[in-house]
Image (tube, rainbow, N blue to C red):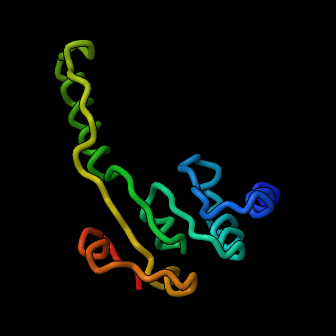
Amino acid sequence: MEEAIAQGLRDEVSAFYLSGEPMLTINKSRAVPALSKAGRPTVGPYPELARAGILMSYSSDLDDGFRHAGSYVAKILGGTKPSDLPIEQASKFVFAINLKTAKALNIAVPPSLLALADEVIE
C-alpha cells in the first residue's frame, strides 16, 4: 500500500481513491493514515471511511441492501423460484463529507455540496 501511494505521489496524482476491496476496508486504520500523510484528497465508497478520515465517500446504503437481501431470502424460502425474482438496482445512497479532513487539506467545501451530504463529519 505504501509503495502504491509513493508511486501515486511520484506520478503527481491529484487525489486517491480508496476502493471498497475488503482487505483495504478491514485495514482502514492503516490505509487512511498512510493516505492522509500523502496530503492529497482521498475518496472512497463507504461512510465509515469518511468517518476514519478520508475526504468523502459515496455508495449505496449497505443496510438498505441487506434488508432487500433479507426480503429475497424470505421469498425464496416461501417457495418463489430465484429466477422469478427481478434484479433490483440500489435506490438509496449515502454521501459523507469529512470537514476536518477538508480543512487539513485546505479545501473549501461549497455549501451546495454540504447540503447534499447525508453525513457531515466535523
Along the horizontal axis of the image, is 44 left or right of 1?
left
Along the horizontal axis of the image, is 98 left or right of 5?
left
Q: Quadrant of the C terminus?
A: bottom left
Where 89 falls versus 108 (above or below)? Answer: above
Along the horizontal axis of the image, is 64 left or right of 26?
left
> Relative to the observer, which residue lies in front, 40 or 36?
40
Q: Residue at x 76, y 57 (%)?
A: 11
Q: Quadrant of the N terminus?
A: bottom right
Q: Residue at x 27, y 41 (%)?
A: 90
> Relative to the observer, which residue lies in front, 25 or 14?
14
Instruction: Please give the count of numbered marks on the rendered protein.
Output: 0
Please tell me in which quadrant of the rendered image residue 89 appears: top left
The x, y position of residue 83, in whole percent, is 26, 12
Please tell me in which quadrant of the rendered image residue 99 appears: bottom left
> Relative to the observer, which residue lies in front, 99 or 61?
99
Where 87 falls versus 26 (above or below)? Answer: above
The x, y position of residue 32, in whole percent, is 63, 69
Where 6 falls versus 86 (above or below)? Answer: below
Along the horizontal axis of the image, is 26 left or right of 111?
right
Q: Residue at x 45, y 58 (%)?
A: 46
Where 78 falls versus 24 (above or below)? Answer: above
The x, y position of residue 115, in whole percent, is 24, 74
Please tell me in which quadrant of the rendered image residue 38 appears: bottom right
The x, y position of residue 100, in whole percent, is 49, 85
Q: Residue at x 45, y 67 (%)?
A: 56
